[in-house]
Amino acid sequence: MLVYSERVANFKDTILGVESDDFQFSNLMKNGHIQLDYAEIKAVAIVTSATKKGVLYCNMMDMKNPANALTTRVVDQISGNYNYKMGVAKNKENW
């Protein structure tokens, strides 16, 4: 199946000399520092009763895993770490 997202957040530019409130994600979006991009991966679906309808789990522990393309690439400005490995995606069964 094809798993894709049209809302993968990425930094457009480097931010220097801003106030503390400007580091909030919503303010970064409003001020044009973050853009939403498209990403897709090809995956094999395993359907189980343990997973709720509409929920997709992917292994994102390995940085080389293609599923990481679907998660945000916005770094937390204070800690220097990436935000949670969570994303929103859609899927197409026949691609």
Image: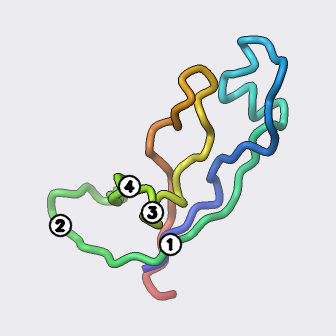
**Disc 4 and disc 3: Cα gap in Å?**
9 Å
In terms of secondary structure, where does tag 1 sit?
Answer: strand
Where is residue 1 shown, x and y percent of the image? 42, 80
Contact between labelled residues 1 and 3, with CB atoms less than 8 Å apart: no
Counting residues from the start of the chain, the first of labels 3 and 1 encountered is: 1
Counting residues from the start of the chain, the first of labels 1 and 4 encountered is: 1
Where is residue 58 shown, x and y percent of the image? 35, 60
What residue does disc 1 label? 41
Number of residues whose C-alpha sits closer than 10 Å to that of mark 1, classed few (under 14), some (14–19) or many (20 or more): some
In terms of secondary structure, where does tag 2 sit?
Answer: loop
Q: Is residue 79 left or right of residue 31?
A: left
Counting residues from the start of the chain, the first of labels 3 and 2 encountered is: 2
**Residue 64: mark in rendering:** 3
Q: Label 3 amino acid?
A: Lys
What residue does disc 2 label? 48
Counting residues from the start of the chain, the first of labels 4 and 2 encountered is: 2
In terms of secondary structure, where does tag 3 sit?
Answer: loop
- Asked which quadrant contains residue 6, the reply is bottom right
Q: Nearer the viewer, residue 26 or 53?
A: 26
Number of residues whose C-alpha sits closer than 10 Å to that of mark 3, classed few (under 14), some (14–19) or many (20 or more): few
In terms of secondary structure, where does tag 4 sit?
Answer: loop
Number of residues whose C-alpha sits closer than 10 Å to that of mark 2, classed few (under 14), some (14–19) or many (20 or more): few
Q: Label 2 amino acid?
A: Thr
What residue does disc 4 label? 60
Q: Is residue 8 above or below residue 75?
A: below
**Disc 3 and disc 1: Cα gap in Å?**
13 Å
Where is residue 87 shown, x and y percent of the image? 49, 50
**Disc 4 and disc 2: Cα gap in Å?**
19 Å
Disc 3 or disc 2, which is closer to the eye? 3
Disc 1 or disc 4, which is closer to the eye? 4
Number of residues whose C-alpha sits closer than 10 Å to that of mark 4, classed few (under 14), some (14–19) or many (20 or more): some
